[in-house]
Amino acid sequence: MSDAAIVLAAGKGTRMRSALPKVLHRLAGKTMLEHVLDGLLSEGFVCPAVVVGYGAEHIERVTGARCRYIPQTEQLGTGHAGRVALDTLPAEVERVVLVYGDAPLIPAHAVRDMLELQRNTRVPVVLLTTRVADTRGFGRVIRDESNDPVALVEESDLLPEQHAIDEVNLGAYVFDAGFLRRCLPLLRPHLPKGEYYLTDVVAMSARDGTKAVALEIDGGVDVMGVNDLIQLEQASRTVYDRSHRRLMRNGVTIVNSASTFIDEDVRIAADSVILPFSLISGQSVIGTGCTIGPHATITASQIGDRCTVVASTVENSKIGDDVCIGPYAHLRAGAHVENGVEIGNYAEIKQSTIGAGTKIHHFSYLGDAEVGANVNIGAGTVTCNFDGMRKHRTVVEDDAFIGSDTMLRAPVTIGAGAFTGAGSVVTRDVPSGSVAAGVPARVIRRSVRSKTDSETERRK
C-alpha cells in the first residue's frame, strides 16, 4: 500500500503576535515544523509535502531539503491547503497522512497506530483525539448515539450544549486518498473569512454512510497543538520533561529537572550528573561520569568521559576525557580539547586544538591556535590572531611554558620546551628549548629545562 504525508504549514498564526511564521517558533531547540517532520521521518516518511504560504522563503531556508514545498498562494484554510497538496501527489498514492505543522507534541507512534487502524478498518478517515479539562479553544469531536465521530466543530461554531464536550481534535489524520480526492472539491467556504475547513470531511464521511474512526490517545494538553506563545512555553516544558525522563531512566542524574533544559536530541551516558541552571542543546553528546553545571551552557558539542563543566559555555566543540572546564570559561566553535586539559576562569578558546595535559588556568584568549601537550598557558596570554584583514595561526609545541601576559602575534611558533617571560610580546618564532622575553621578545638563553634534558641525554 502506497502512503504519502502532507504537513500544513501555511498559516501566519496571528495569535502568536509575531512576524515569525508560526511553525518556525522553537520549542526545546527545534522549530515546531522540525518536530513534526522528525516524527514523520521516524515512521518512514522521508520527504513529506509541506504546504507553505506566509513566510515560505523563511521556512525553506530553515528547514532545507528534508521536505517538498507546496505553495498555497491564497490563504483559504486547511481544506484548500490539503487540496493544493493532494493535487501534487502521484496517482498511485492510496493513503494520506496529514498533520498540522503546529502540532509538535503528537507522539510518532500515534501515526503508526493510525495507519494500522485504517488498515484494519478500511474506513475513509482516521482522526487523532484526546480528552482535556481545558480545551483551549480547540475543535470538538461530535459523536452520534453509536459513539462514532460524525463531525468536527470549531469552538466558535459550537452549540451551547456542545461546549461541555472534552474530546478535542489534535490535527492529525489518515485518509483514504480516493475519498479525499472526491471530498475536497466539494467543500464549501465558511464565513466570515471564506475559508475551507479540512475538518468538514468528517461530516461528509458520516453523510456518505462511511463513518470516520477516532484514535483517542492519552496525554491531554501534553499532546495538543500550539496556538499562542503561552502554549508554546507549556509545550516546551513538555518536551524537556520527556527528554529528562528518558535520560534519568537511562542512569543520568538530573538534580533539579525544573531548572534544567536538555533538548531531546542530546545523548548523555549513565552516571553523569546534571546540576541546576544548565542548558544542553543540539546534538550534544556527553560521556559517562561527567558533572555538568551548575550554570553550564553546552551547544552541539561532544564531551568525553569524567569531565567537569562548571558555569561555562561550550559551543560546537569537541572535548576529550578527564577535562576540567570553568568556572566562567568560553569554548567557541572549533575548539578541540584533548584528554586531561584544565581550563580555568575567564579563558576563551576558538578554532584551536589544545593538547593533552595542557593547563590554561586563568583569563586568556587562544584563537586559531595549535597548542601541544603539557603546555602551561600563563594568566593573561593572548594570541593576536587578526591583523585587521586576515586570521593567522599560532603554534605552541609540547612542553612549552607561556609566561603571564604574553602576547603571541601570529603567525608565530613557540618551539617545544621553550619559555616566554612575563609581559613578552612575541613577534618572531621562538626556537625549541630557548627562553624569550621582552618587548619585542628576543631569545636570551637556553631554558633550564632544556639544559637539564641535554645533560641527561649526554649521561646516557
Image (spheres, helix red, strand yellow):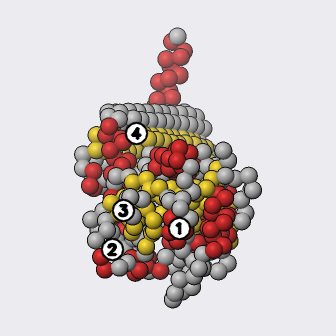
Relative to residue 19, is residue 163 drawn left or right?
left
User: Is tag 1's residue or tag 3's residue first in the polypeptide sequence?
Assistant: 3
- Hey, which residue is sitting farthest bottom in the picture? 192
The picture quadrant where one finds residue 323 is top left
Where disc 3 sits, the SS reads loop
What crowding class fits label 3: few (fewer than 14 Cα within 10 Å), some (14-19), or many (20 or more)? few
Counting from the top left corner in percent of width and height, residue 242 is at 36, 49
Name the amino acid, label 3. Answer: Glu
Counting from the top left corner in percent of width and height, residue 96 is at 61, 56
> What residue is shown with label 4?
268
> What residue is shown with label 3?
145
Q: In the depicted view, which residue is nearer to us: 410 or 272?
A: 272
Q: In the depicted view, which residue is nearer to us: 26 or 327?
A: 26
Q: Which residue is drawn at 53% across and 22% down?
A: 454
> What residue is shown with label 1?
207
Name the amino acid, label 1. Answer: Arg
Name the amino acid, label 2. Answer: Gln
Question: Badges 1 and 2: C-beta atoms under 8 Å apart?
Answer: no
Q: Residue at x 67, y 70 (%)?
A: 84
Name the amino acid, label 4. Answer: Ile
Question: Badges 1 and 4: C-beta atoms under 8 Å apart?
Answer: no
Question: Badges 4 and 2: C-beta atoms under 8 Å apart?
Answer: no
Q: In the depicted view, which residue is nearer to us: 333 or 373?
A: 333
Where disc 1 sits, the SS reads helix
